Structure formats: C-alpha cells, structure tokens
Image (tube, helix red, strand yellow):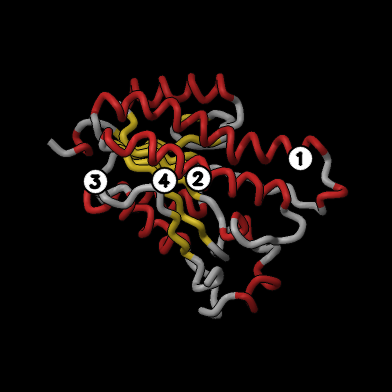
Amino acid sequence: MSPRDQGCALVTGGERGIGGAITERLRADGWTVATLGRSGGDVIADIGDREAVKVAFDEVQERYGPVLVLVNNAGQRLDSLAIRMPDADWDAVLETNLTGAFTATKLALSSMLKARWGRIVNISSVVAEHANPGQANYAASKAGLLALTRTVAKEMAKKGITCNAVTPGLITTEMTTDVAQALMPMIPAARAGTPAEVAACVAFLCSDEAAYVNGATIAVDGGMAA
C-alpha cells in the first residue's frame, strides 16, 4: 500500500506563494494535502504558538489521517539592520521560521515512526548561506533550519524517514516584491524563479524516488549561490 493511501501531507503556510504551489503539486501527485496557516488554510493556527500547533495537528490527523509528509514552509520577514532591530522582531521571526518548524517536525515524527516512512522538507532560503544586510533574524532562522534538517536526517535515517531542505533564491511572490530589483543582478539566470519550480523540487524530495536523498540542501536559485 502506498503511503498516499495511509496518511496525508501537511504544508504550513500552504495557501499562497511557494506554499500554495507546493500544495497544488502534491495534490496533483496524489496526496491528500492539509494546509496550516495563521490567517487561512484547512487548519488555522499561529505556527509560532506551540500549543496552537499541537491542537492543529490533532485536527489534521483526525480529519485526514497521519501526517506522513511535512513541508515546513511558513515564514515571515521583519527586516532592519541588526543594530536597529527590535527584540520583538527577532523573537517573532525565529519563533515562526525556526521554532514553528521544530514543533511541527516533532509532532509529525510520531506518525512517521509508526508508519516507518516519512518525508520532511524544510523551506529555507539562499540567505541562510549568503548574507543579506537587514535580515539578521530571517537569515539566522533559515540557517537554523539547515542545521535542524541535517540533525533530524541523521536521527531518523534508519527509520525510513528523510529530512531535506530547499533554499529558494529570488522567487516571484508577494514576499519578494520589495527586494527583487536589488537581487536581480546577482542571479546568473537573469530572472526570478517561479513557485512552481520550487514545488517541483519539493515534490521530488517527497517521493519514493528520493528515498536515498537525506540531509541534503538543494538550491533553487538560478545559480545565485554558485
């Protein structure tokens, strides 16, 4: 029996932008997909609120079955130079982008261990490895996701569970409209990427064909990080 027949996929921040494209692609691949978001989705919860996420997971699994694919996509940006960054902005971005992913991962692993099959994909960013002034909080959270990815991958490798990361570069979404012009000269491909191009990479990592890809970071950035 296929994992698709035994459980569901959960995409945080899965209603629009990159998350929306991932949701659409996984559904096209045959997955029952639930989305979780602060202001919309099949289940509404603030990903940075541990207790709310626990309640949301219970609701998702009661409605759709065990979570066997988790895409940690939810994120936010609150940019400013480090010297001027309010402590609240640092905390908010780390709680959403990193702590939220950890909480969701921890909850999903229980179901994956029972099934002895699971796929976790963390949506990081090119800024996790290449500095962008004004994004100390965002970059730190996305770099933390890469370390979380590698650690979970090693811990779960013998259990049929993989954990990988994708680092998008400039992707055409509402979140990137304010930085697109400044970043374009840095992209060898001389264009922004599309959410569907990120989703295609995520879909591969969620497939049976990617069973031997674990702890990897795959750039979808038009050569930006090369």
x and y percentages locating residue 17 in the rendered image: 51, 54
Residue 141 occupies quadrant: top right
197 vs 73, left or right, is: left
Is the residue 132 above or below the residue 224 in the image? above
Q: Which residue is mark 3?
A: 30
Residue 73 marker:
2
Kindly report the distance in space between the C-alpha atoms of the residues bearing marks 1 and 4: 25 Å
Q: Position of residue 102 (x, y in %)?
A: 51, 33
Q: CA distance from mark 2 to mark 3?
A: 20 Å
On the image, numbered disc 4 is attached to which residue? Answer: 121
Q: Secondary structure at mark 2?
A: loop
Badge 1 crowding class, 10 Å Cα cut-off, few under 14, some 14 to 19, many 20 or more, is some
Q: Residues within 10 Å of mark 2 (few under 14, many from 20)?
A: many
Residue that numbered label 1 is attached to: 89
Task: Compare marks 3 and 1 and give the one earlier in the sequence.
Answer: 3
What amino acid does circle 4 point to?
Val
Left or right placement of residue 168 versus residue 77 in this view? left
Q: Nearer the viewer, residue 152 or 189?
A: 152
4 or 2: tag closer to the N-terminus: 2
Q: Which of the two discs, 2 and 3, labels the residue nearer the N terminus?
A: 3
Answer above or below: position of 24 versus 104: below
How crowded is the residue under tag 3: few (<14 C-alpha within 10 Å), some, or many (20+)? few
56 left or right, relative to 224: left
Distance from Cα at disc 3 to Cα at disc 1: 38 Å
Residue type, numbered disc 1: Asp
The amino acid pointed to by label 2 is Asn
Residue at mark 3 to residue at mark 4: CA–CA distance: 17 Å
Amino acid, disc 3 = Gly
